[in-house]
Amino acid sequence: MTKQIDFPLIEVEETAKAVIARGGFIYQKWTCGGCGKRITGNVRNGLFIKGHCEECNHVTDLLVTGCNYVAFMPANARSVQQPTETKQ
Ligand SMILES: [Zn+2]
């Protein structure tokens, strides 16, 4: 059992950008304001201010409710924790 917690979209964007900068990618997640279903977006690295539910057709205002994401990191980024020294 994992508790689903949503955060303000602006904070989510900040941390999502950090994941993407490290070579990972994210899918946005939110809870439908209509039916309460937990939804995962289908746009890679996409963060949206409105979330449409295919089950009940409700559009959730994610600026109001907040959201989260699921992050995927490439295997070779496993040891990267502090992106303080990023050199190309
Ligand atoms: Zn719904």
Image: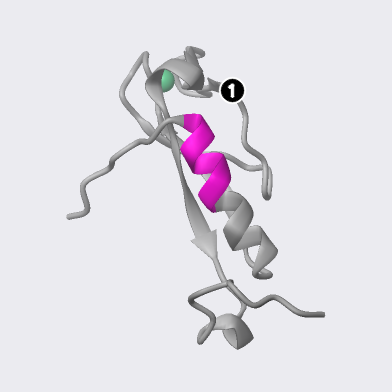
Q: Is residue 13 inside the magenta stretch?
A: yes
User: Badge 1 is on which residue?
Assistant: 49
Q: How many labels does the image show?
A: 1
Q: Tag 1, which secondary structure? A: loop
Q: Nearer the viewer, residue 30 or 9?
A: 9
Q: Quadrant of ligand 1?
A: top left
Identity, as a three-letter code, of the amino acid under mark 1: Ile
| Residue 52 image position (x, y, % from top left) | 55, 21
Magenta region: which residues? 9-15
Q: Nearer the viewer, residue 85 or 66?
A: 85
Residue drawn at the location 56% of the way across and 45% of the way down? 14
| Residue 59 image position (x, y, % from top left) | 52, 13
Secondary structure mainly formed by the magenta segment: helix
Q: Is residue 68 inside the magenta stretch?
A: no
User: Would you place residue 81 above or below residue 44 in this image?
Assistant: below
**Mark 1 nearby-residue class (10 Å; few <14, some 14–19, many ≥20):** few
